[in-house]
Image (cartoon, grey):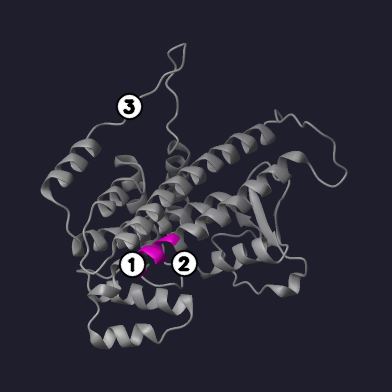
Amino acid sequence: MDISESLRIVSQALSILKNEYAFHKSTICLGNAFFTGVSEKEYISMDNKLKAIRQDFAKILIIMNSIDRTYLAYKSDKYISSFFSIIDSQATSELGCFIEYLFAKYRVILEYIQQILNICIPPSFNEIQKEEYSKLQKSHKKYKYLLKYISENIDKTNSLLNTDWFQNIRIDRDFIIHDGATCFVFSDKENLLFKVMTTDALDKEEKSEPFFENSEGLKYYVRYWGMHISKLIVFAETVFEFLIKIGHINNENMFLIHSFYSKEKVKIEDSDGTELNDVQDVLIKMLETLMGEIQLKA
């Protein structure tokens, strides 16, 4: 793990979360952008994908809050089980199901981003690029080509403008969705530890990730998901920023968008006046913890 690069990514993700709701302003701006060569049908499709990204990231945050609440109750012996199982505990099973959901929604957001890129970027290709792109059959090769195009046309390099960094999470998700794998959460009240277990452990080859794993190869939830969600946020915002620049938004719409998102977040209180946590607070707390743990490794 590159310490300085990891710190930069987590710090950038934290900055976004503390100033706005992730995936909101950028997707709204993109939904109001005009691209030469894009059909009305494609605009409708893109708008649907942008809405789906906002919805699915909101679901990720809801699940993360559920994980935080369930694990807190479990490690403080306040978790109340509603049934008896001779196989495992309800708390760890519940946490495993929640984490499996994270894998599924994480991957689908990456797929939506690819579909949006496929709408917005190809009309800008020159004849050689159009020919090269048309010859690509595999989806991952097309994704790689589109990200390479962005990388070659932005002002600064970005280590996430490739498909390498999310391959491990893709593999785990595919095993869970298609091959009967399960996310097993271990009975540890010091750290939330998990591992994606296949029906046949020999099916899946994994590279060792010392920072994200303990000595037994079990993944630290905070480190693993904190780093991957940071990468997803920074990756998506980089891609959307590029697309917004090559598109066109009329001045009136841009003014309305900036005016709306310049407002401070509204603080919500319950009936006794206690301020309620924002849905993103659980992720902000996770990334702040992760920053501290990365700095200890430096």
Please tell me which of labels 1 and 2 falls first in the chain: 2
Q: Quadrant of the C terminus?
A: bottom left
Numbered disc 2: secondary structure: loop
Q: Nearer the viewer, residue 147 or 113?
A: 113
Relative horizontal placement of residue 63, taking residue 73 as reference (left or right):
left
Q: Residues within 10 Å of mark 2 (few under 14, many from 20)?
A: few
How far across and how far down the image is residue 198, in percent?
73, 65
- Magenta segment includes 52: no
Q: Which residue is mark 2?
A: 1
Is there a contact, CB below 8 Å, between mark 1 and mark 2?
Answer: no
Magenta residues span: 112-118
Spatial CA distance of label 3 from label 1 is: 35 Å
Query: Does residue 214 appear in this view?
Result: yes
Which residue is located at x 36 percent, y 78 percent? 145
Q: Residues within 10 Å of mark 1 (few under 14, many from 20)?
A: some
- Quarter assignment of residue 66: top right
- Quarter assignment of residue 68: top right
**What number is the disc on residue 119?**
1
Which residue is located at x 32 percent, y 56 percent? 237
Q: Which residue is mark 3?
A: 266
Numbered disc 1: secondary structure: helix
Please tell me which of labels 3 and 1 falls first in the chain: 1
Spatial CA distance of label 2 from label 3 is: 38 Å
Nearer the camera: disc 3 or disc 1: 1
